[in-house]
Amino acid sequence: MRIDKQQIATFNEGLLAGHTKRFEYISSEIDGVEQIISKLIDFQIGIPSWALGAGGTRFGRFHFGGAPATLEEKIEDVGLLHALNRNSGSISLHIPWDVPKDYAAIKKVAADSGIKFDAMNSNTFQDQPGQLLSYKFGSLQNVDKAVRKQAIEHNIEVIKHGVELGSKALTVWLADGSCFPGQLSFRNAFNNTLESLQEIYSALPEDWKVFVEYKAFEPNFYSTTVGDWGQSLLYTSKLGEKAYTLVDLGHHLPNANIEQIVALLLNEGKLGGFHFNDSKYGDDDLTAGSIKPYQLFLIFNELVDGMDARGMNHAKDLGWMIDASHNVKDPLEDLLQSVDAIMAAYAQALMVDKKALEAARANSDVAQAQEILQNAFRTDVRPLVAEARKRAGGALQPLTLYRQLGVREQLIKERGVDSQTTGL
C-alpha cells in the first residue's frame, strides 16, 4: 500500500483553516518560529524493524492482521509512517531476522519509500535455529572462548550487511550477566566483554560508530555486564573514538535522573544516541511520552543545550531511534504517536529561553528557573509540529488520516489476517 501526496493534500485542505488560526496564534507568542520549524523538518527518527509487529510478554502474544512478514514489507510500513509524518525517514534492522537476499533490490525498495538504513542491531541474546553454541550463559562475556568467538563473528557479519545497505552504525545490546551470586566473576565478565568488543571495534569501517547499550536488569536479575551508563562509558572510553553510549529510556532503575546522565555523556563526547520509549515500572517499552512527558522534555532540554554547546547538528550527529513493544495497540498507530511526542518535546526544548535560564541560574533564582522550563513545557506546540509536517509534505493529523484511509484494513487485505512479523 502507498499513500500518495494528493491524498495528504486533500486531507490537509479540510483542516487548513483551523490549523492556520492555531499556528498564527502560537507564532505570535514565540520568538524564532521559522528556525524552530526548520529544525523540526530536518529531524528524523529511526523506526526499528522489530517494532512493526505484535509485541508480547513472557505470558503470551496477541497477533494482529496485516503484519509485515518480509523485510520488504517492513520497509514499506516505515514508508507509510514517513509519508504521513515526514519524520520517520529511516529503518533500523535487526540481524538475523532482516538479512537481505538481494542488497540492490532492498535498497531500491527503501529508496522508493524515501527510507534510509539506520543503525544495524546484532542479536546474541537468543539462540537461533541451527546455531552451534548457546548463549545461555552469556555471549561476549562467556567463559567459553568459542562462544565469545561465535558472538564476535555474528557482530562482524552484521557490520558487513550494514556496509552493503549504507548504514553507518552498529548497536550492541547484551543480555549477558548472572542470575545468582557466585555464578560468575564480575571482573572476568567485564574483561571478556571488553576483549570481545575490541575485536568487533577493529572490524568497524572508518566512518562507522558502535553504540554500546546498557540495561539494569532482565533477563539476568543479579548482575548485568553492561548494567548502567557508567559501565557503558567505561567500555566506550576504552574502545576508542568511534564508540559511544546508547541510552534506552526504559533501561534505568525507577526515578533515575536520565536528563543528568544525558548531559554528562554529552559533556564527555560519548553520547551516541537514543532508543525512545516510556515506562512506569521498568523496561515497559511503552509509547514515548505516554507516561512521563515532562521527563522527555527535560531530556531534550539537556540535549539541545549540550549539542549547541558542542556545535553539533541536531539532526545528524546523534542517533535517534524508537524501541517499543506493541502489545495492545496497532504498531503503526503507536509509532505515529511516539514520533509525535518526540517532536513535541524537541519543539518545547527549542523554545526554552536560554538567556533567561542562565540569568536565573547565575542568581540562584530557583523559582524563576523552574518557571522558565515549565512555561516551555506547558506551551501547546502541536500547531508548530503540524506546520513543520505540512511544509515537509506530511499530514496535519497523521493518526486521523491513517484511520480515515483504513491503512490497517488495507494491509490485512494485502497480507492476510494471520501474517506475522519475524523478530522478537
Image (spheres, rainbow, N blue to C red):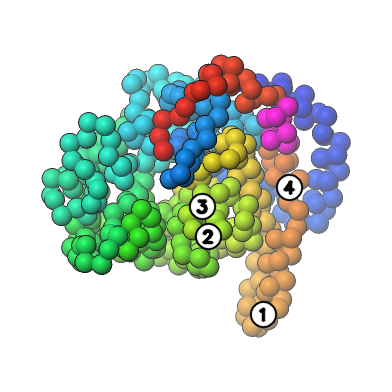
- Residue beneath disc 1: 366
Compare residues 136 and 145 and report the one nearer the observer: 136
Calculate the distance from the C-alpha at mark 4 to the C-alpha at mark 2.
28 Å
Q: Nearer the viewer, mark 2 or mark 1?
A: 2
Q: Nearer the viewer, mark 1 or mark 3?
A: 3
SS at circle 1: helix
Disc with the residue nearer the chain's start (1 vs 3): 3
Disc with the residue nearer the chain's start (4 vs 1): 1
Which amino acid, mark 1? Val
Check contact, mark 2 vs mark 3: CB within 8 A: yes
Calculate the distance from the C-alpha at mark 2 to the C-alpha at mark 1.
30 Å
Disc with the residue nearer the chain's start (3 vs 4): 3
Q: Main secondary structure of the magenta part?
A: helix
**Percent x, y for residue 329?**
60, 39
Which stretch is magenta?
A: 395-404
| Residue 281 numbered mark, or none | 2
Q: Nearer the viewer, mark 4 or mark 2?
A: 2
Which amino acid, mark 2? Tyr
**Percent x, y for residue 229?**
39, 63
Task: Determine crowd level at label 4: few under 14, some 14-19, many 20+ residues with C-alpha closer than 10 A.
Answer: many
Q: Nearer the viewer, mark 3 or mark 4?
A: 3
Check contact, mark 1 vs mark 3: CB within 8 A: no
Q: Is residue 404 left or right of residue 328?
A: right
- Residue beneath disc 3: 284
Residue displayed at 82% across by 33% down: 15
Q: Is residue 352 left or right of residue 193?
A: right
Say if the magenta span includes residue 254. Answer: no
Which amino acid, mark 4? Arg
Say if the magenta span includes residue 401. Answer: yes
Q: State which quarter of the image contains the N terminus.
A: top right
Disc with the residue nearer the chain's start (4 vs 2): 2
